[in-house]
């Protein structure tokens, strides 16, 4: 499969986030090397409609920066990271990465996309928790953007 960046294609980026969350979750479960996870995902036919460049940016970034992301998240959490459900952890790490490293993406988009992932894959009310944590992280790290909204 060839990698493709679909600039200004919101749906392709949305799909990239969905598959990235699933890849991060798989990494949590298996601790496989990223290259193995990447190969499995890129071989899927559904990836034809995904911004694969953004998918790779997100997954590689989260896996590379997970310790730093966890430090930022832990400041906003009411419990230790190890007590989080692995789906919630994958969504929080993905959202934190976008908030901290993808400043071109408005924080409200990051929050909304994370909420939608939690509604799709998480426990019944996990989206409320995800929203609260990422909103706190945004206020701490994108305070100027949050004030303008």
Image (cartoon, rainbow, N blue to C red):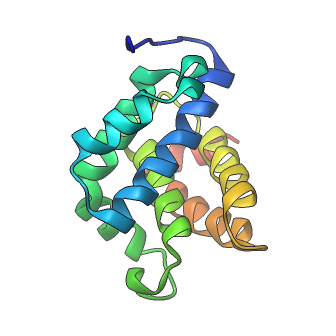
112 relative to 106 in the view: left or right: right
Give coordinates of residue 114: x percent, y percent.
63, 51
Residue 38, quarter of picture: top left
104 relative to 36 in the view: left or right: right
Query: Is residue 123 depicted above or below 4 in this figure?
Result: below
Give coordinates of residue 44: x percent, y percent.
50, 30
Q: How many marks?
A: 0
Residue 43, quarter of picture: top left
Give coordinates of residue 101: x percent, y percent.
36, 40
Quadrant in which the C terminus is drawn: top right
* Residue 69 vs residue 46, the one in the foreground: 46
Query: Quick check: can you spot residue 140?
Result: no
Give coordinates of residue 76: x percent, y percent.
48, 74
Quadrant in which the N terminus is drawn: top left
Residue shown at 32% from the left, 33% from the top: 39
Query: Is residue 78 depicted above or below 61 in this figure?
Result: below
Residue 15, quarter of picture: top right
Query: Is residue 6 depicted above or below 94 in this figure?
Result: above
Query: Is residue 134 depicted above or below 4 in this figure?
Result: below
Residue shown at 25% from the left, 56% from the top: 32
* Residue 42 vs residue 91, the one in the foreground: 42
Query: Quick check: can you spot residue 121?
Result: yes
Residue shown at 55% from the left, 24% from the top: 45
* Residue 95 vs residue 57, the one in the foreground: 57
């Amino acid at each position: 499969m060839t990698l493709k960046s679909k600039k200004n294609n919101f749906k392709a980026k949305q799909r990239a986030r969905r598959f990235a969350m699933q890849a991060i979750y798989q990494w949590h479960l298996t601790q496989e090397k990223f290259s193995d996870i990447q190969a499995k995902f890129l071989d899927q036919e559904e990836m034809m409609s995904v911004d694969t460049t953004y998918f790779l940016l997100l997954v590689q970034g989260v896996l590379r920066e997970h310790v730093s992301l966890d430090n930022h998240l832990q400041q906003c959490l009411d419990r230790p990271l190890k007590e989080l459900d692995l789906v919630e952890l994958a969504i929080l790490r993905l959202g934190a990465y976008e908030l901290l490293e993808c400043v071109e993406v408005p924080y409200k988009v990051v929050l909304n996309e994370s909420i939608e992932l939690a509604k799709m894959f998480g426990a019944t009310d996990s989206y409320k928790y995800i929203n609260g944590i990422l909103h706190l992280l945004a206020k701490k790290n994108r305070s100027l953007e949050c004030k303008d909204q």
